[in-house]
Image (tube, grey):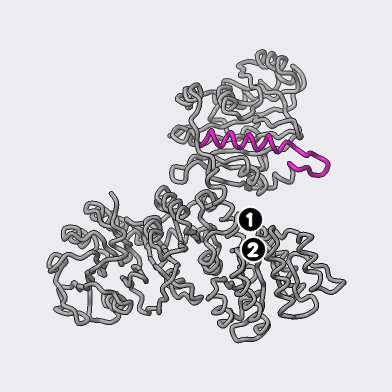
């Protein structure tokens, strides 16, 4: 059933249940805020205790209203909520805001109340916002079902704010940067409507150019994916801040709304896959909103030039930008030729550019900027300045820089961005106004500015790659047949299955006696490894169930007997494998998550897995480029490239194995819960890679 979210956010008439003449009462505040924003529709207070509220006729119940209304705001204690939602449904009201707390955020009794609330809403097809929320503001639509006592003076604009925290919604809605607000939505406990539903609705509005989302959890990942993809297709970036990165943060989320925060690395992978920009704090969110609102379609490149008026600031920009993933390419010879006239003979222009050169000169600075704008390798020019809110520092020079940028912006399709090097003294309002008229973003703080520039550029790269992202493909019929009995596959069959889907594996022979083990070793060639076999035999090395480097028959016989005794009844069959290596040991795995999809995991493997707890995660299936990027995110890359005389190793073979296993995992989400290779041994360059230990877990155990 499609819920009428549009009717909720843009009603023509509203009922306020629990309205009161007390000015500090929630119902009165909502009426006052509707009037402050200029709501043009009918407002119908509902409360059997009063004949009139705020100069409006007050009705005893929703069923007593003289006309049908589009939406209702329920401002009563939680125990009355479910019955009132039921009454609203019977009265034909299909959009309701429930404000009270004490539902899922309030223990077992509250969770039971919320279940009744949800059931009543779903029974009548009601788009229900909340509970435990502050309502919403639709600035362009002049609707404010909003509980805050202090109502800001909203400037209509392109930014939609959706927050699972009411306090964060209030903070962002103050809009002290004058970005202009389209919507503010406090999602609360999300009994029915979730952040995804609000995203899906607001991106349809032509006034909206960027969406800010504060998340404690994602309750409906599939719906969120659909909304994020729709936003991306419309060219409207979604910028998310997801809390719960730490253990304490996850505990705070659970205490706040009764929701589980989830594993943070999974959210990183989820956002990366679906084109959502993740920021780390409110400062980044605000600066990102400013940048994306000005330039919603960034270039697919992390390269840029930074211009400052100080050698120290240029060096700082280089340090911070490189750390954040930006790239400062050397200036091209034609650009250098044009710049030299603006610099002393002993000064060599480089990127980032210290434009002080021969001192400040307006015409000379314009020549520098024109040369950079004409360089085809530089899609973005960012300028670091020192213009304080009070007019101190380099405000006079910054004003001239802003004027030059405004003039040149009319002549180029390059992106110009200014940022104050420090945040403490605030942005200069005159400079902000000048740049704002030309649509040039003016950001606060060098590190924050460079961080959001990096996120903006990464978003541009992801948009460019989106059409080429691999999709899960069908498996060959014989592979599908093997999967139908995945729970009963033995180790040899598991290795064979992975070979069939393109993952290189070691030769494996199952043996039941010492004599069979010796015969297998003779056939495979010494040295060999002997291991316990069986899906219920985990952590073989730690439990003494692996013997490596066995060079002859007596060693194989002794290893078989010792391992068989240690394993007892858990492993009636053992495995013999040829030794592989030396090489770099990786862990490569897929976890098929019922909420977030098929997750591919890569990192250093073998005995280092639990020690380092370091891995890169993506939503699969992944392609070659993504697999390389994943390896580069971990310390495995250093070893693969060659370290202390060892290597280099076969990175290409490792990448192909990651891609193959990721494709297999994504194609088997209905039957495979997890598949893990630990280790995948990557041999010296040209030697390939080989899986020597495989775990395959079926759905349902």
Q: Please determine whether, in this image, residue 673 is positioned above or below residue 424.
A: above
Label 2 close to label 1 by CB (< 8 Å): yes
Question: Looking at this view, is 90 or 256 the one in front?
Answer: 90
Magenta span: 640-666
Q: Residue at x 56, y 50 (%)?
A: 464
Q: Is residue 653 magenta?
A: yes
Question: Looking at this view, is 408 or 380 the one in front?
Answer: 408
Question: Looking at this view, is 403 or 561 the one in front?
Answer: 403
User: Helix or strand or loop: what does disc 1 sit on?
Assistant: loop
Q: Please determine whether, in this image, residue 458 is positioned above or below residue 629.
A: below
Disc 1: CA contacts within 10 A as few (<14), some (14-19) or many (>=20):
many
Residue 283 left/right relative to 190? right
Q: Residue at x 26, y 77 (%)?
A: 28
Residue 173 percent location from the top left of the image: 43, 72
Q: Please determine whether, in this image, residue 153 is positioned above or below residue 69.
A: below
Can residue 627 be seen by looking at this rendering? Answer: yes
Residue 301's mark? Answer: 1
Residue 380's mark? Answer: 2
- Magenta span dominant secondary structure: helix
Q: Residue at x 65, y 49 (%)?
A: 633
Can residue 144 be seen by looking at this rendering? Answer: no
User: Helix or strand or loop: what does disc 2 sit on?
Assistant: strand
Q: Residue at x 44, y 42 (%)?
A: 594
Residue 365 left/right relative to 152? right
């Amino acid at each position: 059933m499609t819920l009428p979210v549009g009717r909720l956010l843009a009603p023509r008439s509203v009922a306020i249940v629990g309205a009161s003449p007390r000015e500090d009462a929630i119902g009165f505040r909502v009426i006052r805020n509707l009037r402050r924003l200029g709501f043009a529709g009918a407002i119908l207070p509902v409360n059997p205790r009063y004949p009139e509220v705020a100069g409006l006729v007050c009705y005893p119940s929703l069923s007593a209203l003289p006309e049908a209304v589009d939406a209702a705001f329920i401002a009563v204690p939680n125990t009355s909520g479910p019955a009132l939602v039921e009454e609203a449904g019977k009265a034909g009201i299909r959009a309701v805001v429930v404000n009270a707390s004490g539902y899922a955020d309030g223990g077992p009794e509250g969770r039971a109340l919320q279940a009744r609330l949800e059931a009543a809403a779903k029974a009548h097809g009601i788009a229900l916002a909340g509970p435990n929320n502050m309502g919403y503001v639709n600035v362009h639509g002049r609707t404010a079902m909003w509980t805050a006592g202090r109502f800001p003076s909203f400037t209509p604009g392109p930014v939609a704010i959706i927050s699972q925290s009411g306090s964060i919604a209030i903070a962002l809605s103050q809009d002290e940067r004058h970005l202009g607000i389209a919507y503010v939505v406090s999602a609360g406990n999300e009994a029915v409507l979730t952040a995804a539903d609000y995203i899906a609705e607001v991106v349809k509005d032509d006034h909206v150019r960027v969406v800010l989302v504060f998340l404690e959890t994602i309750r409906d990942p599939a719906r969120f994916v659909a909304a994020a993809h729709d936003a991306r297709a419309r060219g409207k970036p979604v910028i998310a801040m997801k809390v719960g990165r730490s253990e304490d943060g996850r505990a705070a989320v659970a205490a706040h709304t009764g929701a589980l925060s989830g594993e943070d690395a999974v959210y990183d992978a989820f956002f990366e896959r679906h084109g959502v920009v993740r920021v780390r704090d409110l400062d980044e969110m605000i600066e990102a909103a400013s940048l994306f609102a000005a330039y919603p379609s960034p270039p697919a490149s992390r390269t840029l030039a930074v211009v400052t008026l100080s050698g120290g600031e240029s060096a700082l920009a280089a340090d911070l930008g490189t750390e954040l993933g930006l790239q400062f390419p050397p200036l091209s010879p034609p650009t250098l030729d044009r710049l030299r006239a603006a610099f002393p003979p002993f000064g060599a222009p480089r990127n980032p550019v210290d434009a002080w050169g021969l001192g400040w000169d307006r015409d000379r600075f314009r020549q520098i900027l024109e040369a950079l704008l004409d360089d085809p390798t530089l899609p973005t020019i960012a300028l670091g300045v020192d213009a304080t809110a009070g007019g101190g520092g380099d405000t006079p020079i910054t004003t001239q820089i802003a004027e030059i940028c405004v003039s040149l912006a009319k002549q180029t399709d390059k992106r110009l961005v200014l940022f104050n090097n420090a945040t403490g003294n605030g942005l200069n309002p005159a400079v902000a106004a000048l740049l704002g008229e030309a649509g040039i973003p003016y950001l606060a703080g060098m590190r924050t500015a460079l961080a959001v520039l990096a996120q903006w550029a990464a978003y541009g790269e992801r948009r460019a790659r989106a059409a080429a992202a691999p999709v899960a493909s069908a498996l060959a019929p014989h592979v599908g047949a093997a999967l139908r009995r995945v729970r009963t596959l033995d180790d040899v069959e598991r290795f064979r299955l992975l070979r069939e889907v393109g993952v290189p594996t070691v030769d494996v022979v199952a043996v039941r006696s010492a004599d069979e083990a010796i015969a297998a070793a003779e056939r495979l060639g010494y040295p060999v490894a002997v291991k316990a076999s069986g899906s219920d035999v985990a952590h073989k090395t730690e439990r003494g169930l692996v013997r490596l480097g066995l060079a002859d028959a007596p060693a194989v016989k002794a290893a078989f007997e010792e391992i068989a005794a240690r394993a007892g009844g858990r492993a009636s069959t053992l495995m013999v494998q040829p030794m592989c290596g030396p090489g770099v040991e990786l862990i490569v795995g897929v976890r098929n998550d019922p909420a977030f999809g098929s997750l591919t995991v890569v990192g250093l493997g073998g005995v280092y897995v639990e020690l380092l707890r370091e891995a890169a995660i993506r939503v699969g299936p992944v392609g070659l480029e993504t697999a390389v990027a994943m390896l580069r995110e971990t310390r495995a890359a250093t070893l693969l490239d060659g370290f202390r005389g060892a290597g280099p190793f076969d990175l290409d073979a490792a990448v192909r194995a990651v891609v193959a296993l990721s494709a297999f995992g994504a194609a088997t989400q209905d039957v495979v819960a997890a598949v893990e290779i630990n280790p995948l041994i990557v041999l010296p360059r040209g030697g390939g890679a080989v899986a020597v230990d495989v775990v395959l877990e079926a759905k349902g155990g």
